[in-house]
Image: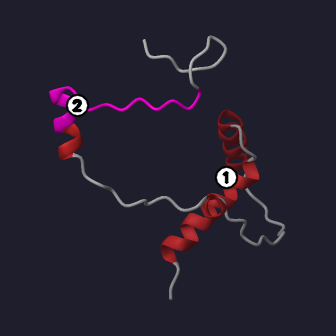
Amino acid sequence: MPDSGGKDGGDIGKITEYRSAPKGVAEAIHAAEVIDDFLPPPEELVLRDETVKVTISLTQKSVDFFKKTAEDQGVPYQTMIRKVLDLYSQRYQRE
């Protein structure tokens, strides 16, 4: 086992250089394809949309559904309702 340095002695920061890899690994590296980074940076992952407080009357059945589902998912039920409305409005938004 190579020495990684530390308490037991050895050189911390020592770099092990491999001159050849097993055939399967070498073939896999050679066949690998570079994929562009498609993820947004962390600051763009969770955007806070401006919200507006409204008063709305919903059926008890709908509220019970969202409360139960939100509890199961560990999120606020109002957030779930807002997301459903956002998805609906995005789907049918006229430009």
Q: Residues within 10 Å of mark 1 (few under 14, many from 20)?
A: some
Residue type of the residue flagged with mark 2: Ser
Residue 17: percent from left, percent from top: 36, 32
First to last magenta residue range: 12-27
Residue type of the residue flagged with mark 1: Met
Which one is in front, 9 or 62? 9
In the image, residue 48 above or below residue 72: below
The residue tagged 1 is 80
- Tell me: 93 left or right of 53: left
Residue at screen point 73% across, 48% down: 77
Q: Image quadrant of residue 44? A: bottom right
Residue at screen point 15% across, 28% down: 23
Which one is in front, 42 or 10? 10
Does the magenta segment cover residue 22?
A: yes
At mark 2, the secondary structure is: loop
Residue 20: numbered disc: 2
Residue 85: percent from left, percent from top: 63, 64
Colouring scheme applied when the structure was drawn: secondary structure
Which one is in front, 64 or 71? 71
Which one is in front, 58 or 95? 95
Q: Image quadrant of residue 83? A: bottom right
Q: Image quadrant of residue 89? A: bottom right
At mark 1, the secondary structure is: helix
| First in sequence: mark 2 vs mark 1 | 2
| CB-based contact (under 8 Å), mark 2 and mark 1 | no
The number of discs equals 2
Residue 80: percent from left, percent from top: 67, 52
Does the magenta segment cover residue 47?
A: no
- Tell me: 72 left or right of 19: right
